Amino acid sequence: MSAAADSPSVVDLRSDTVTRPTPAMRRAMAEAEVGDDVYAEDPTLNRLQTRAAEIFGREAALFFPSGSMANLTAIKTWARPGTEVICEAQAHIYLYEMASVAAIAGCMPNTVPAPSGILTWNLIEPLIRPQIYYRAQTALIELENSHNMHGGTLYPPAVAEEICDQAHAAGLPVHLDGARIFNASVALGRSVADLTKKFDSVMFCLSKGLGAPVGSMLVGSRDFIDRARVTRKLLGGGMRQAGVLAAAGLIALEESPKTLHRDHENARHLAEGLAQIPGIAIDPKKVVTNILIFDVSGTGRSPADICAALAKQNVLCSPAGKLTIRMVTHYDVDRAGIDRALAAVASVLGARAASRPS
């Protein structure tokens, strides 16, 4: 992170990964009871894993340094080398995890684009390989909820459940990249256990909107987690006194979901303001969680150029493509920060920020 991003005057909308641990998290980390987790003896980490499993209605859970390692572990646990993993064409596991699905798990992504990133069984079924010995076989289906690169879009529960039911009937497991599943839960008004009950495994992040400094979780059956623990160790994820991190994760898990609705409200407020700036194209009604992706082609300037100009005004964001910019709201940016960001965008683009009630 740049030195400028450490300043409280900076509005950092690059990602919800930039959230800082709360004072309560820092105190818990300093006071954490610890042990050696490779021996399964860290009491704080054991509590975190037990609590995560309870919240998701699962038999067991496992802590990871990152969501990418947790996703990779799930893939390696479900799929052997030489098989295929079906996912959406802009899935995080396909675009942003260093091709580890191929390089380390030895699997081939089989992708299909989907409107708003939301796969349906009708899109998935044609990708399932026939049972012919000289064809690579389908081993796993992967979904992402909320969907990062489609602007935080959400799976309708009935759509996700149909995919799981049909996949199971075909003998295939389904893994959920639920990095922001708590955002989905808040937006849909359904518990994470209810939203994910038919998935065979679920990854979720503690270090995004929930605000923990480090960590993600993988939940599933006891047998799956026992096998995943072996894979995690293979990948270098065996940790020692990890309770220092788990202590913050416990607070994130219990407390942070209560405030996610504010991030969603701020994202909608930001989208409504952006929509009024000439040259920007975004439909605020489609902003349902904390991620916005908006088109700036009408400005005649590149996303990189606009982001660089905004950084000079202490507003940080990132290009999402050749024509788009992504902004992500989180608990370290309040409504006043959102309004400062809107004013900066208007200034950079030579427009007048619309005056709207908060």
Image (cartoon, grey):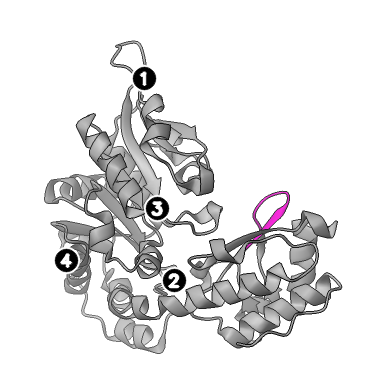
Q: Is residue 217 left or right of residue 264?
A: left
Q: Label 1 belongs to which residue?
A: 136
Quickly name the residue at label 4: 54
Q: Which residues are magenta?
A: 319-326
Which of disc 1 and disc 4 is earlier in sequence? 4
Whole-percent x, y for residue 49 in the image: 21, 65
Above-or-below relation of 223 to 178: above
Type of residue at label 3?
Tyr
**On the rendered structure, is 188 left or right of 153?**
left
Q: Secondary structure at mark 2?
A: loop
The numbered mark, 2 or 1, whose residue comes first in the sequence reads 1
Mark 1 lies on a secondary structure that is: loop
Kindly identify the residue that appears in the image at 34 percent across and 47 percent down: 159
Q: CB under 8 Å between callouts 3 and 1?
A: no
Query: Do the CB atoms of the residues marked 2 and 1 lie less than 8 Å apart?
Result: no
Front residue of this view, candidates 235 and 225: 225
